[in-house]
Image (cartoon, rainbow, N blue to C red):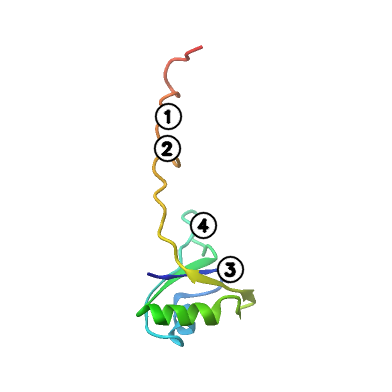
Amino acid sequence: MSVYIGNLSYEVTEDSLNAVFAEYGSVKRVQLPTDRETGRMRGFGFVEMGTDAEETAAIEALDGAEWMGRDLKVNKAKPKEDRGGSFGGGNRSNYGGRNRY
């Protein structure tokens, strides 16, 4: 399981986020998603820690804390939802064919 961190400054780096979470235990991985088109940070990230106890300690300490001018939103990350075909070019059988009027 990993920890979700929201409301991050766009200036944050993986190293700086790693340093903050390392105070609460071993950090296995840090992810900072970027926008595909601009390459700019999206304002949230994920940290995977060594144990559930370390994750809980970090969440309790950092949720609502002010860091880099922002109040952090920190909680357990939810599993990524399967969007299916409802976004980005699903079945468009009514388009491009004959009009059925």
Q: Which mark is residue 15?
A: none
Which numbered disc flags the more N-terminal residue, 3 or 1? 3
Query: Dot 4: few (<14), some (14–19), or many (≥20) neighbours within 10 Å?
Result: few
Q: Measured from the top left, where is residue 45 in percent x and y?
A: 48, 68
Question: Callout 4, which amino acid?
Answer: Thr
At horizontal 46% and vertical 84% (from top left) the residue drawn is 19
Q: How many marks?
A: 4
Secondary element at tag 3 = loop
Q: Are marks 3 and 2 in contact (CB under 8 Å)?
A: no
At horizontal 51% and vertical 11% (from top left) the residue drawn is 101
Relative to 7, residue 61 above or below: below
Secondary element at tag 4 = loop
Residue at the disc numbered 4? 38
Q: Which mark is residue 92?
A: 1
Q: CA distance from mark 4 to mark 2?
A: 22 Å
Question: Callout 2, which amino acid?
Answer: Gly
Q: In the image, is 33 to the left or to the right of 1?
A: right
Residue at the disc numbered 3? 7
Q: Measured from the top left, where is residue 64 in percent x and y?
A: 60, 76
Query: Residue 66 appears in which quarter of the rendering?
Result: bottom right
Residue at the disc numbered 2? 89
* Marks 1, 4: nearer the viewer: 1
Query: Residue 48 appears in which quarter of the rendering?
Result: bottom left
Query: Dot 1: few (<14), some (14–19), or many (≥20) neighbours within 10 Å?
Result: few
Question: Callout 1, which amino acid?
Answer: Arg
* Extreme residue toward the bottom, this view: 23
Query: Residue 84 appears in which quarter of the rendering?
Result: top left
Secondary element at tag 1 = loop
